Amino acid sequence: MLKNYIKIALRNMGKNKFSTFINVTGLAVGMAVAILIGLWIYDELSYNKYFKNYDRVVRIMQHQTFNGNTGTQNSMPLPLAGVLRKDYGNVFKYMVMSSWTQEHILTYRDKKLNREGNYMQEEAPELLTLDMVKGDRNALKDPSSIIINERLAKALFGDEDPMGKAIKMDNRINAKVTGVYKNLPKNTEFNDMDYITTWALYVSAEPWLKSNVDNWGNNSWQVFAQLQPGADLEKVNLAIRDVKLKNVARTGDNLAKSFKPVIFVFPMNRWHLLDEFKNGINTGGRIQFVYMFGIIGIFVILLACINFMNLSTARSERRAKEVGIRKTIGSLRSQLIKQFFSESLLITLFGLALSVVLVLAALPWFNEVADKEMHILWANPLFWVICIVFSLITGLVAGSYPALYLSSFQPVQVLKGTFKAGKNAALPRKILVVLQFTVSITLIIGTIIVFRQVQHTKNRPVGYNRAGIVQILMKTEPVHQHFDAVRTDLLASGKVEEISESSSALTQIWSNWSGFEWKGKAPDLQDDFAYIQISPEFGKVSGWNVIDGRDFIRNNKADSNSMILNESAAKFMNLKHPVGEIVRHGDSKYTIVGVTRDMVMSSPYNPVKPALFVFNREAQAFMTVRVKATVNMSEALAEIEEVFKKYDPEAPFDYKFTDSEYAQKFADEERVGKLSAFFASLAIFISCMGLFGMASFMAEQRTKEIGVRKVLGASVLNIWSLMSKDFVLLVVISLVIASPVAYYFMESWLQNYKYRAELSWWIFAITAIVAILITICTVSFQAIKAALSNPVRSLRSE
Amino acid sequence: MIKITNLEKFYRTEEVETIALNKLSMEVKKGEFVAIMGPSGCGKSTLLNILGLLDDPDAGSYLFNDIEVADFNERKRADLRKHNIGFVFQSFNLIDELTVFENVELPLIYTGVAAADRVKKVEAVLDKMQIMHRRNHYPQQLSGGQQQRVAIARAVVNTPKIILADEPTGNLDSSNGNDVMELLTDLNEQGTTIIMVTHSEHDARYSHRIIRLLDGQTVVENIMI
């Protein structure tokens, strides 16, 4: 029986090549999208699962309250890890303090590389269950050791055995390779990290750490831990909740105490997808994209299923006779249902095969857009089971309506040849077309709004001129020590406008300080400023706008205890005439000499944070160079490199362009925009294919009517509008439904951004025009073809 | 074999109620060859559809082999149909996507005959209908007469007890029509009961008995000699 079903299905497919093409391609495209989204979701959900103790690894975090708003952060005071280890050893199996992942210069013989890595405490390899290729997980016990991943081992040592070799870090400290571990997969938290070296080396590289051993107010480090088996998260949180509060009280740090710090553990299984906190409550995070893309995937598949349903039922009059005959001969309705299901399953399986090919073709591009390393899980039986099960479900959904509808025909009617699907028979098809276009139009509107939000934010005035600026993260001292000489050389070259030093790059804020005092500060006001130390050339390099007072003046001794505020800071401090006011912090005293226009240094979607730019000739971390606008950038870079090498021949010259660093801030939103554009185009493509098929069917069905009309004097234009009108109406209905739906969802998406584009009516108007144009183009081909046909022919065919 | 009593069938639209069969009673014995005649709209086809269990009556009794089938459900009717009744239509009603062989094979598939037996049976009946040489052709590739022979082959392949033929020669020229009538006669002589609806007095003469219908009622019965 099944053989017979398949046989007739194949012959039907062969006979109706056009609708088979639409069905198979549509389903294949839909399934390819679903597989891509499935792989993406799989990748997201398996994030960090590489770590074997995924369920028990936690990050120590804290809530702090500033002026009634609770903020949540993962930077911790230095003494915390030790106290937790000592006092709560029964709940924590491992406790690992870590620096932030940062670039360092690694030197082996004459090879120098700039690579990112962390300083971590010795239990890190166990906590991260590193897969050691050489050495073992005790490799960090020796205070001068470093463990490296295979990627770095290859790059630094080539084919040599790295074990026991000495690596010089930042031309300052020596570390001995005691282990090599397998590269961490891209979908893990630490995939940027190429090596781990010891906390002891950190302390020797950064002697200032010693002054923080009992400082609970400086939150500058990360702490990771692994819970003991069976430790209950809630109980742990309750136990460690006040550990910082008690200690800031003990040390008399009233400022830190006023922020009411609450320490808690945040499990690894929430790090990636559920890492957002709003006012101290864990509210979600990237998981919203998992839901969003999951829903889009299902919708796109559904669109393809709708094509199948519509084309099959539209062709029902042709299949009716077969149904009648089969029933007469003795077929049960259930057997016919099975037959039609086997047909749709067959088509779905063809679609699946084609979709795998499409996925293979699209995956490199998709990986690039999504910034992932996904691949088809050929060897994973689960992947195939899901694909097959999913295809079966798709086949059943796509086949359900045709199977139930076609099998319901009564043989007496269909065999008499009097069978004509009634007027209402087309109604379900129309509803399905409306559904298709509602989904497509919603996606289109959503995509436009995402791009517009990105564009709107990109157009936001940043408050400085970011073109032609090069920023260099300094890992070694010599250039800083010879700053004046470096500057003189660069200026003398004629290629450089100015060079400055600062503690943060223009595109980042590395440090936030609290506890400032100024005249008129409300007693209960808790302050929190971005704190940037700069050399006096910073203003000229950045091109900021001083709107009150003046910029710092080089060689002006009096400026050494002065600061410049941004507008937001002036407003926050409620200073009408800030210039000349005194700001105190502990024993330090600064005079405000100027106010600048706000500069967007962190997220462009958020308001600019109040910032203090403090004059400091010892500011390090970053060199920022403004190249003369008239000078060729690569020539300028060569010049800068030469000068830097002159003073620090050991350090590789490594730079970043400020404007591309700034552009990075849009990467996430642009990714979402590109992906939704991709899905929206495919959705509209699938819908149009269905529309095209429907139009061709409609033209065929109305051949006689068109013939009669032409004989009676209808023009091509009349016929064309007659044929197109119905479809345009359906799309208009879809627009009416989709617009408020899209408005609702996008409005709530935009709420995530403080700096956002308003939703304007023209987005909807443009979408409407485009959707109607696309519809007319799709339908017109068939409509005009029908209109141009010879009426004699069509009438004779009756 | 077939006994109907006071059979009624109405067709209703919103405004009109048409009586297709009006308390019709008749009987067909095993081995008979009966022709049903009458003007268009007299209820011939309705009667045939009810006899063939494709349609159900609104009132009255229908005994098939002494079993009341008037109130059978869809499944039971399909089951009775596929084992006992063969159909021949004016417009042949072959499935275009299946070959001659596959069309004839279809009823055997629905009655669950094993594949090897099916080949034997289909080949035997195609041979008998003299269309063996066309076994792998599709219906559109055959002449009308050949198509009707395939349709008859399909009707008899299951060796039904009764064949219902609805104007079997209506779409054929006279020579092909005569061939078809000869085939039906042969089948009848081999023991198959045949009920045939026809407009053609010529075809009706092949039968044993003519039932003439008018407005859903039997008006005359002629016994052929």
Image (tube, rainbow, N blue to C red):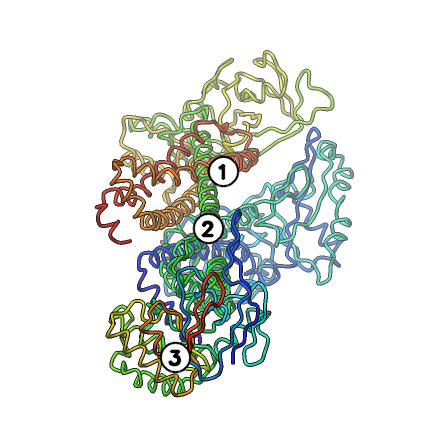
Tell me how far mark 1 sits from mark 2, CA to CA: 25 Å
Chain for numbered disc 2: A
Residue topped by disc 2? A425
**Quarter where residue A269 is shown:** bottom right
Tell me how far mark 1 sits from mark 3, CA to CA: 73 Å
Q: Is residue A566 left or right of residue B141?
A: right
Q: Is residue A375 above or below residue A776?
A: below
Q: How far across and how far down the image is residue A638, in percent?
A: 29, 38
Residue topped by disc 3? B224
Measuring 58% from the left and 71% from the top, which residue is drawn there? B61
Q: Secondary structure at mark 2?
A: helix
Residue A738 circle label: 1
Indicate the amino acid at tag 1: Ala
Indicate the amino acid at tag 2: Ala
Q: Is residue A638 left or right of residue A519?
A: left
- Choose mark 1 or mark 3, whichever is in front: 3
**Residue closer to the observer: A366 or A246:** A366
Q: Are marks 1 and 3 in contact (CB under 8 Å)?
A: no
